[in-house]
Amino acid sequence: MTLDVLIVGGGGAGCVLAARLSEDERTTVGLLEAGPDYGPFDPRRWPAELLNARSAARGHDWDLEAPPCCARARVIGGSSAHNGCWATLGAPADYDAWSKYSNGVWDYQKLRPHLTDAIETLRVRPVPEQDQTRWHHAVIDAARELGLPFLDDINDESAREGIGWVPLNAVGATRWHTGFAYLDPARNRPNLRILSDSLAVRLVIEGDRATGVVAVRDGQEYTVTAKHVILACGTYGTPPLLMRSGVGPEHVLKELGAPVVLRLDGVGENLVDHSSLGLMLDPLDALVGEMPNAAESYFAQTVVKARSSQADDSWDIHIVPSAGPAEDAQGFYTGPLSAGLYVFVMSPRSRGTVRAASLDPAASPKIDHGFFTDAQGYDQKVILEGIELAHDFARTERLSGLTGLTPWSAAEREPTAVLAAASGYWHPVGTCAMGPADDPMAVAGADGKVHGLSNVYIGDASLMPVIPRANTHLTTVAVADRLAGLLLEGALR
């Protein structure tokens, strides 16, 4: 099998890339996905949990033993088929910050049309009135008590601080992921081939080119030959694939037992997610009585955008109010009624790493988020200010009648306690970040092409050099959409 383009990873970015690149009927495109393909949208064929927009799924996760913030899905649609359906945008300044890493190729104005298209294609809509719980209306009332405005559209460029309903990429109660929104309209194109249940083992590299990808299906290896290879395995998956192929930091490759084909120190570096802590509350009888069907409602419906003393003119804190079945260690919502205010650092400075654990492609990667480890302690200052604001919410007249509060002690605010309790927001980016070739930590150029390889591209969230102040689904889709256009205009012409 020889293709013009092979996309490795059929997730949020891969489905977009396959759809956009196959629009050119002269270009043969393959989409390699480790998990199953249940075909076009059909409730009779797709597992119910993947369709249920009211609760994040875990049934197709790569590793249920990993912490929930490391979750990623092995199925067509990828994590967009597992996620919470949030569809939020970062501040314009976040995307403008990409300009210096791309010599002006990427910034807010250039990305905005693709963000708008993603909102339309994913059929993003507000939380419907029938799903809006009394708990979330109470939190909106509490925000007013604290002087925070209600935001009619939290994605509006002027919506820099306040509370609002979160837009969702859902049709009714169905999660409308990129497999449905992008891949389905392209499925019948004769120049598109979907290769499901095929786990990428390594790239076959000769000189400065990848001639193809070795994959395994049903225990048998096979090779797909391609003129161009686009890696869209995600922030946790793309670096290990490169490392198994001999591309990455030299000391990491030697420890792994991989050949040193190309030293590229930035592979697996610059991991960033929105770090978090949770202020858990005690549901009172009044809240229990107001939420008799909590398990049937989407539990995270509103978000507070707030500014710490460290912020620029836009928010740097999210507070996510939740009330619903308690979460177990694997991230499944199975327990009794739980309530909390989860606080997130939206412009974090701490960085972590992703490493391949072994040459076995089925082995889970080694992920070290490095939450709250920046040398200046910036992230800890921001999170503790956010925790204080969460306490203020809990003490309002509106919320104190629904939940009890046990204020944090001084010990819980100590750096060691913060590190021990740290978690993330399921928004990892940056492990194959774009940047100029003379930047030792840059992995790819503004066109996504990997430095030192002439036909291998990064096409997923690992390419983002700066994390947006939002969940990263819309931005990932927009990046894949714009990158496809750049490739059709340039390398694939």
Image (spheres, rainbow, N blue to C red):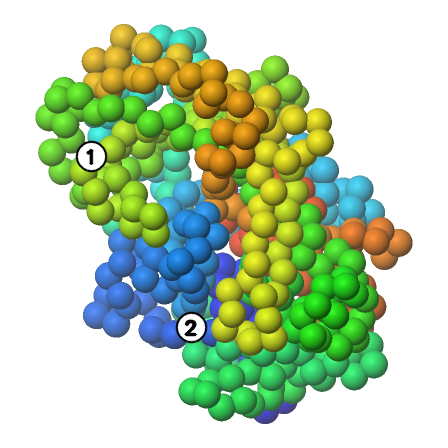
**Which residue is painted at 29% across and 50% down in the image?**
332
Q: Is 45 located above or below residue 144 in the figure? A: below
**Which residue is painted at 83% across and 53% down in the image?**
440
- What residue is disc 1 on? 337
* 193 left or right, relative to 314: left
Residue 338 at x, y percent in the picture: 25, 33
Residue 105 at x, y percent in the picture: 76, 49
Where's the N terminus, which quadrant?
bottom right
* 144 left or right, relative to 28: left
Residue 374 at x, y percent in the picture: 67, 34
- What residue is disc 2 on? 35
Counting the numbered discs, the total is: 2
Q: Hey, what amino acid is under mark 1?
A: Leu
When asked about the image quadrant of residue 232, the answer is bottom right
Find out whether the residues at labels 2 and 1 contact each other: C-beta distance under 8 Å.
no
Q: Residues within 10 Å of mark 1 (few under 14, many from 20)?
A: some
**Which residue is painted at 85% across and 57% down in the image?**
437
Residue situated in front as seen by the camera: 457 or 239: 239
